[in-house]
């Protein structure tokens, strides 16, 4: 039995995300179905595992839609876990990414470290710089467009989290996933609400 959770937008297409309870899962917990397209999640799962699996399948959808491929399935897991943890721990970041709040959040917690976020008037290339010092910070250029900044922050979140878990991800994959996540965060409020809701 399949139950629609929500519709989301990815690469300009409306994609259903559904829970399915079935004996056919045979150990699977999620599935990106490119021929439909849709994301199916095992209806027996709950909480953080279910939400991380959703992001895992979003990454597979990005791989398919962009013609890129992660060479290691564990990296997909690491990327999904990193993004989920960053979004859950940083409501200010979610607001800035999704509803377009004018200013970035004052702080962001990534891999257990609190980073001060500030903007700089100096021209910077790239548009974002991470400073690891006694007072770690993320410095964002005021000269870059808002979407470039948002993609750079998402890409940085992924890079830092995946590196902390012991594996790198190519900048091409980070860029593809950043664009896709930004699209979901901006155009699919029900997906964002579901992703961030707490289960008792």
Image (cartoon, grey):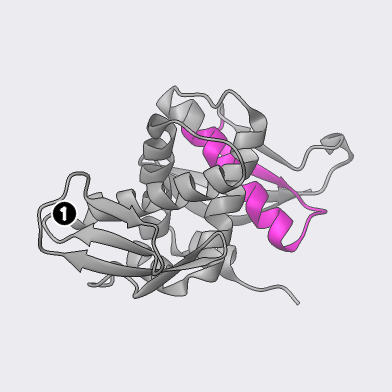
Q: In this view, does 38 lie to the left or right of 31?
A: left
- Give whichever of 131, 190 is nearer the camera: 131
Q: Looking at the image, is 134 positioned above or below residue 77?
A: below
- Give whichever of 87, 180 is nearer the camera: 87
Locate residue 61, reporting x and y percent.
52, 35
Q: In which quarter of the image is the C terminus?
A: bottom right
Residue 5 in which image quadrant: bottom right
The residue singled out by tag 1 in the image is 145
Q: Which residue is drawn at 43% across and 49% down?
A: 181
Q: Looking at the image, is 67 positioned above or below residue 176?
A: above
- Based on the picture, tell me whether residue 111 belongs to the magenta stretch: no
Residue 167 in which image quadrant: top right
Locate residue 8, reporting x and y percent.
47, 51
Is residue 106 visible in the rendered image? The answer is yes
- Give whichever of 33, 169 is nearer the camera: 169
Q: Residue at x 83, y 53 (%)?
A: 44
Magenta segment boundaries in residue numbering? 36-62
Locate residue 30, reporting x and y percent.
70, 41
The total of numbered circles placed on residues is 1
Q: Residues within 10 Å of mark 1 (few under 14, many from 20)?
A: few
Locate residue 139, reporting x and y percent.
27, 61
- Based on the picture, tell me whether residue 42 belongs to the magenta stretch: yes
Please, which residue is most extreme toward the front here? 134
Is residue 37 visible in the rendered image? The answer is no
């Amino acid at each position: 039995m399949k139950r629609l959770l929500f519709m989301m937008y990815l690469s300009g297409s409306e994609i259903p995300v559904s829970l399915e309870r079935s004996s056919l899962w045979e150990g699977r917990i999620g599935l990106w179905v490119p021929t439909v397209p849709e994301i199916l999640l095992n209806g027996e799962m709950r909480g953080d595992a279910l939400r991380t699996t959703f992001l895992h399948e979003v990454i597979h959808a990005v791989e398919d839609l962009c013609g890129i491929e992660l060479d290691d399935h564990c990296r997909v897991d690491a990327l999904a876990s990193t993004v989920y943890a960053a979004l859950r721990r940083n409501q200010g970041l979610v607001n800035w990414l999704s509803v377009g709040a004018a200013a970035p959040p004052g702080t962001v917690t990534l891999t257990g470290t609190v980073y001060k976020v500030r903007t700089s008037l100096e021209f910077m290339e790239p548009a974002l710089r991470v400073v690891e010092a006694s007072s770690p910070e993320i410095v964002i250029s005021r000269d870059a467009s808002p979407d470039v900044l948002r993609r750079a922050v998402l890409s940085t979140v992924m890079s830092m989290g995946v590196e902390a878990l012991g594996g790198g991800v190519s900048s091409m994959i980070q860029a593809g996933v950043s664009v896709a996540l930004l699209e979901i965060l901006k155009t699919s409020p029900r997906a964002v609400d579901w992703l961030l809701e707490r289960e008792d």
